[in-house]
Image (cartoon, rainbow, N blue to C red):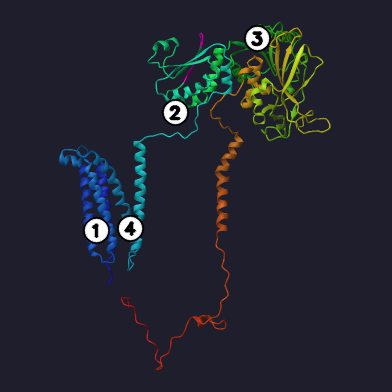
Amino acid sequence: MTPPPHRVYPSAVYGLGLFGVYLGERIIDAGKATTIATVAGLALVVIGLVARGLELGRQPAARRPSERLLMGLAAAGAVALGLYFLNSNLFFKLTGRTFEQDFPRGSGVVGTLWPALLLCGTLPVILVEMSLATMKRAPVLDQRRVRAAMMSGLGLAFALVFSFAVAYVAVERDVKFDLSYFRTARAGDASKNLVRALDKPVRVYLFFPPANEVCEEVESYFADLTRESKQLVVEHYDHALHPAKARELNVTGNGIIVIGREAVREQIALPLQLERARTPLRVLDQDMHKKIIAVSRPDRNAYFVQGHEERTFEPLGDTDKRATVRSLKELLAEQSFEPKELGMAQGLATEVPADAAMVLIVGPRRPFMKEETGALQRYLDRKGRLLIALDPDAGQTMADVLAPLALKYRLETLANDEFYIRRNHQDSDRTIIATGSYSSHASVSTIGRFGLRAPVVMLGAGYLEKDEKAAIGIVNVDFTVHAAASTWNDKNGNFQHDSDSEVRTAYELAAAVSKRNASAIAVDDEARVVVLADSDLVGDEAFRHPPNTYLIRDAIRWLSGDEAVSGVINTEEDVPVTHTRKQDTILFYGSVFAVPLLLLALGFLMTRRRRPRKMKPQPVVPSAATPSPSEPVWQAQVEAPPSDPSGSPPSPPPAAPGAAS
C-alpha cells in the first residue's frame, strides 16, 4: 500500500503567518492595520502548527521522524514569537507595565534570545522541505538526507546569529584600534648638538591639561634633550590653572609649546587628542630644531647674486625650464637666514653689503664684470662666506673667483654607465650620476656617516681640479664629494665611453675651501667657500632626494660656522609614494590582467599535475575461480542453470518478502 505523500502547506501557512507578524510589527505604521496584520499572522502560525500536528498523525511510522523535525522547528519559531511579544507593547497593554520594568535583566536576555531562536526555527524548515521535495515519489524516505538538511539550516542560522552578535557587541563597545605605524619623532643628533651649543638658557613652556596622552609624548621627547644641557629648561603649565602665565606668553589655550630665549619666542600648536596629534608628533624634532635655531641664532642675511641669468626663486621666463631654488630659500630660512637678492642695483659692482652673512651664486649663464669679481674677492678678504654652484652647459667657469682659491672648473659633462639614475630609459640618463663617496670634512659630516647608503644625485655635472699656481694667501682645499671611479668625461656628448679621449676616474664634484690672509693669526679668521660642480644639486627637483638636502644643509652650516650643530633630524613622517604615468599604466594593467592570468595559469598547471595516472593493465593469474585464456569471457562469467532430469525448465527463486509483484 502506497503511503500518503508529504504535504507542504503546513510549512507554507506557518511561514505566511511569520510574514504577517513582521508586516504588523515592523512595516505597517501604528494603527488598526497593524493590529489586524499581527493578529492574522499569529492565527496563521497557530493554524500551521495544528496542521503540522495533524500531518504527523497521518503519516506512517517510517515517515514520522522527518515530520517530528518539522514540528519541533515550528514549535521553536512559535516560542520565539512568544518571547518577542514579552518585550512588545502587547505585554504593556495586558499588564499595564513593561517587561523591562519588572525584569530588566530578563528583558535583555529575551531581546537577544528570540531572534536567534526564530532563525533556528525558520531556516532549517526551508532546507528540510526542499530535501523532502526531492524524495516525493520515493517509496522509502532517506532520513539521513533530511537530518543533513536540517543540520545545514541550523549551521547557517548559527553563523548568522554569530555575525549579528559580533556586530551588536562592536556597536555597543565601540573601541577603535589604529594599526597604522606611529611613533613620536625622537630627538635627533642635530637637535642634541644644537642644545649642547646653547650659550644662554632657552626655556620651553608646555601648556597641557593633566593626564594628557599628547603631553606624555611631548615630555618623552624633551626628556632626551634636557639630558644634553642644563641650558634647556622645560616647564609645565595648564591654561586654566595658570592664566597669568598664559597671558604673559600670549597663549590662548592648551596644546601650545612655547620656546623662548629672553624676549624672542616661538610657538608650536598640537591637538590635545592623540589621534589628531599623530601627524605633528611625527615631525616634532624637525619643528623643534627650527624653533630653537630661530630663538638662539641671530637673524642673518643670505644674498643670492642676480643679473647673470642665475637660478632664482621663480622661473625667468617660458624658455627657462631649470628648477628654481625655492627649496634652498626655505632651507636658509630654517637656519635663521633671511634670503635677499644682490645685483648691480644693490651695489654688487661696488661692494658686497656689510651685513652679508653669506653670498650664493647658483648657475650663472653670463660672465661677471671685473667690478663684480673684485667686490666678491674683497668680500672674501673680509672673512666672507660664499657658495658657488656651476653648470657645464652654461659655459661659465668663474675663473677670476676660483683661481685665487686654487680651483679650476671644467665644462665637460660627466657620465657613468654603472652608477646613474634611470629616468627616461635613454642613454642620456647616464649623465644623472650618483655617488656615495665623501671625505671626512665638516661640510659633509652628516651624509659622510652613511656613505653608499645615502648617495647624492647630480643631473649633469662638470668637475673640479686643484690649481696651486694662482692661489693667494693660505688656501686649504678639501674635495668633499668624489664621483665613482667608473665615471668619464663625455667630451663629445654621445653618452658613450670613447677610450681614446675620455678617461674613467673619480672626478671631484664638490670642494670646501678655507682661505686665510698671510697676516691672519686666529684660525677662525678665514673665508669659507663651497663650490659645487652642478647647480641642479640645489634645485627644487634635486631637493626631493634627502641626501642632497643633507649635503646642502651641512654646507650651509659649515659656511655659517655652525658645523657643531650638524647631524640627522629625526622624522617619522610617511614618505609619499609617487608614480609616473607610465608606472601607473603598468600597475593598472598588471593588477587587472597580468596577475589574474598568472594565477589562472598556475592553477591550470597544478590541476594538470594532480590528475590521476592511468592504471596499466595487470596480468591475470589463472586459478580455479579465474577462466583460462582459451575460454570465452561470457562462458566464464555466465553459467547455464542446471537442467532438471525431467526436462522442464528450472523454477525461479522465491521472491523476497515484501517485494512488489
The quadrant in which residue 23 appears is top left
Q: Are marks 1 and 2 in contact (CB under 8 Å)?
A: no
- Separation of marks 2 and 3 at Cα, in angstroms: 45 Å
Q: Nearer the viewer, mark 1 or mark 2?
A: 2
Q: Which residue is mark 4?
A: 128
Residue 273 horizontal side relative to residue 16, left or right: right
From the viewer's side, name the closer residue of 326 and 334.
334
Using the rendered image of the protein, determine whether residue 322 is visible from the camera's viewpoint: no
Q: Which residue is mark 1?
A: 52
Residue 435 place in picture, x, y as percent:
69, 29
**Mark 4 or mark 3, which has the lower sequence index?**
4
The quadrant in which residue 8 appears is bottom left
From the viewer's side, name the closer residue of 324 and 206.
206
- Separation of marks 3 and 1 at Cα, in angstroms: 102 Å
Please state which amino acid type lies under the numbered disc 1: Arg
Query: Crowdedness of circle 4 by 10 Å Cα count: few (<14), some, many (20+)?
Result: many
Circle 1 SS class = helix
Circle 3 SS class = strand
* The magenta segment: 261-269
Please state which amino acid type lies under the numbered disc 4: Val
Q: Which residue is mark 3?
A: 356
The residue drawn where x is 49% and y is 80% is 637
Query: Crowdedness of circle 3 by 10 Å Cα count: few (<14), some, many (20+)?
Result: some
Circle 2 SS class = helix
Please state which amino acid type lies under the numbered disc 3: Ala
- Separation of marks 1 and 2 at Cα, in angstroms: 59 Å
